[in-house]
Image (cartoon, rainbow, N blue to C red):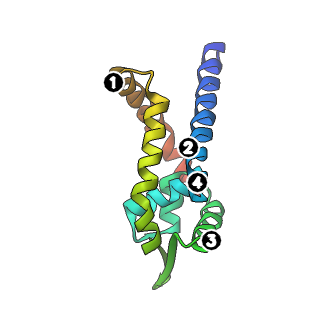
Amino acid sequence: MSSQQEDILGQLSKVARLVKRDIDAVLAQHSLHTGQWALLKAVSLLEPVSQITLSKYLIIEKPAVTKTVVRLEELGFISRKSVGRQRLVELTPQARAAFDAIDEAVQAAHRLFLGELSKEEQHSLEILMTRLLATHRPVEQEESS
């Protein structure tokens, strides 16, 4: 790996940590952290959804999904139900009631974080990040199966 590639990936890692820090600060007001919010957001898009599907969608290991699901169930944000041999995850009424306010607070933090970039720069960044994800996501999903 060239020095430039190391610099790019190092900067990407730093940016990811800063975004996580800022979003965690917003989510702490709701007793959540970024990993839990990512899972709640995925459930809201895919529900009812299996934990295996969540693992693949979020590119995280199955035990981490299970641990997060259990914690969110304890907090009253999600419920699990058995359908045949599958355990499906859904948002609870409590989560639905709080979801829009939490999402807006997170979106405001996103806007603040990206505020120094023009719309064109944000679009270029989105294209590059989408390409990187598309290139590497299938490998990640196969490894977690």
Circle 4: element type: helix
Q: Which of marks 4 and 1 is in front?
A: 4
The residue labelled by disc 4 is: 29
12 sits to left or right of 101: right
Q: Find the residue positioned furthest to the top.
A: 3
Q: Which mark is residue 119?
A: 1
Q: Do the residues labelled 4 and 3 touch (CB within 8 Å)?
A: no
The residue labelled by disc 2 is: 23
Q: Where is residue 91 in the image (x, y as percent from the top left)?
A: 45, 70
How far separated are the C-alphas under marks 3 and 2? 22 Å
How far separated are the C-alphas under marks 4 and 3? 20 Å
Q: Is residue 48 above or below residue 45?
A: below
Q: Characterize the local packing of mark 1: few (<14), some (14-19) or many (20 or more) Cα atoms within 10 angstroms.
A: few
Circle 3: element type: helix
In what quadrant of the picture does the C terminus appear? bottom right
Q: Nearer the viewer, mark 1 or mark 3?
A: 1
